Image: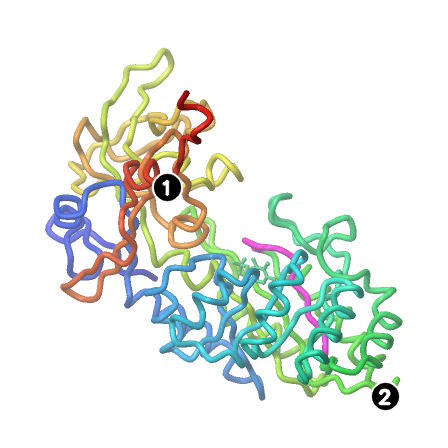
């Protein structure tokens, strides 16, 4: 459920008509609903309420906007980060260092030192050498780093190849067969407190079967390591739950996911950690855009909108679907392609789609754009960096400004040797 709906024929975000935001802020612009964010955070938390000990770390990469993080921090969420930049955002939003988990296969040595210095709560180690480096840096600082070992369980999450992470040929985690030996060596290092395991097998997952299989494999490893005398007190189950990009394709609910987790983990006796991203923010945001032209096409018309692949990369990157709806629908439909202004054929949001009839200057939204949307935006074609707005009841605020080409040009320099 979300808070984007038609009222008196006009699409609203909560109580704010999107026509007002388009007029006052311009388009394209991302619009987030605070009430939707809070609702998703609570639904996710409630789904896990039967579990004894839980820590939820929002995967910041899905939406790193400070205001979004602030909402989630107020809901008691910590953060799953994959860079020091994301760590700075988590801290700036009010999250405690202890509630931050550092994931990622390419944490640099500088990043590891900075994160240790900041006192973050957990390192998810992706390879043995990384663990050795963390231990060494921690000793040099007189600290002990709490860490878990990320396992690659070798299961197919059944999702898009670019967002699958749990197959043995993927770059993430250590192979599950080698995990006991690596774990034992890391656990012996001073400066490192090995406390458990982590996994994350992919994103936009619709089928719980492979996740359950992966969790079961990790459960076996928990028992094996414990039997070998290791202190296994936490398991980080990652994120990955899908969201409905198309109205009629509905993923498993957080509640069903929670029941599965409770069943698989009932004998583990650990703190369970979760790293949801998309499922929290996906439906809490839309990309508001204006139709520039409706260009007659040989096969079908092209609706050319002022949002492009640089603002919302998912269709170009993952062939992703985003529902397209008119802000003031007239009750008629049209069959059209939808594309942006960028000079690439890949800058196409939909082909041959049955959509609300629109004409030049009409406003429209791409739904479910709150996750992996603004955060992947670029300035390709020297377009402005897309702004973000958050709505709260009948008010809204700009939570990320539009960065204009002038500002980008001002950050570039023509060297003296080109001036003679
Ligand atoms: C991307 C990622 C997540 C979040 O994935 P979602 O599909 O957005 O829930 C969680 N953990 C790790 C390690 C990730 O890389």
Q: Which residue is mark 2?
A: 229
- 198 displayed left or right of 186: left
Identify the residue shown where x is 66% and y is 80%: 141
Q: Residues within 10 Å of mark 2 (few under 14, many from 20)?
A: few
Read off the magenta span: 196-206
Identify the residue shown where x is 72% and y is 78%: 196
Residue 273 found in image quarter: bottom right
Of the numbered discs in the image, which one, if any, rests on residue 48? Answer: none
Is 160 in front, or is 264? Answer: 160
Q: Residues within 10 Å of mark 1 (few under 14, many from 20)?
A: few
Q: Position of residue 202 (x, y in %)?
A: 62, 55
Q: Which residue is mark 1?
A: 411
Is 409 in front, or is 42? Answer: 409
Determine the residue located farthest toward the front in the rendered image.
Answer: 420
Q: Is residue 18 magenta?
A: no
| In front: label 2 or label 1 | 1
Is 127 in front, or is 266? Answer: 127
Q: Is residue 201 magenta?
A: yes
Q: How far separated are the C-alphas under marks 2 and 1?
A: 56 Å
- 173 displayed left or right of 56: right
């Amino acid at each position: 459920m979300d808070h984007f709906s038609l009222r008196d024929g006009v699409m609203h975000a909560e109580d704010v008509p999107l026509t007002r935001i388009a007029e006052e802020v311009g388009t394209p612009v991302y619009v987030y609903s605070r009430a939707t964010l809070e609702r998703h955070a609570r639904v996710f938390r409630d789904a896990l309420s039967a579990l004894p000990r839980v820590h939820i770390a929002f995967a910041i990469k899905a939406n790193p906007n400070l205001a979004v993080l602030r909402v989630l921090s107020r809901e008691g969420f910590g953060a799953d980060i994959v860079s020091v930049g994301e760590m700075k955002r988590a801290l700036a939003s009010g999250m405690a260092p202890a509630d931050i988990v550092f994931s990622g296969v390419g944490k640099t040595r500088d990043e590891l030192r900075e994160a240790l210095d900041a006192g973050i709560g957990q390192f998810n180690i992706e390879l043995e050498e990384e663990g050795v480096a963390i231990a060494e840096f921690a000793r040099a600082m007189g600290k002990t780093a709490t860490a878990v070992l990320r396992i690659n369980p070798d299961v197919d999450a059944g999702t898009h190849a670019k967002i699958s992470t749990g197959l043995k040929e993927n770059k993430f985690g250590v192979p599950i067969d080698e995990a006991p030996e690596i774990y034992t060596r890391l656990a012996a290092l001073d400066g490192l407190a090995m406390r458990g395991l982590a996994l994350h097998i992919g994103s936009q997952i619709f089928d719980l079967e492979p996740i359950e299989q992966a969790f079961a494999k990790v459960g076996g490893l928990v028992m094996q390591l414990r039997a070998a005398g290791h202190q296994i007190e936490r398991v980080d189950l990652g994120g990955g739950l899908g969201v409905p990009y198309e109205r009629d394709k509905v993923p498993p609910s957080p509640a069903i996911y929670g029941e599965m987790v409770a069943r698989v983990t009932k004998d583990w006796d650990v703190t369970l950690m979760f790293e949801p991203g998309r499922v929290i923010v996906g439906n809490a945001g839309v990309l508001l855009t204006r139709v520039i032209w409706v260009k007659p096409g040989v096969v079908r018309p092209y609706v050319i909108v002022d949002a492009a692949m640089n603002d919302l990369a998912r269709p170009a990157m993952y062939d992703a679907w985003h529902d397209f709806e008119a802000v003031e629908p007239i009750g008629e439909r049209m069959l059209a392609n939808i594309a942006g202004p960028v000079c690439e054929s890949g800058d196409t949001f939909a082909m041959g789609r049955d959509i609300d009839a629109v004409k030049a200057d009409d406003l429209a939204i791409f739904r479910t754009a709150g996750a992996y949307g603004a955060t992947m935006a670029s300035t390709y074609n020297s377009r402005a960096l897309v702004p973000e707005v958050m709505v709260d009841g009948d008010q809204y605020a700009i939570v990320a400004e539009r960065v204009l080409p002038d500002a980008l040009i001002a950050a570039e320099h023509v060297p003296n040797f080109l001036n003679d």
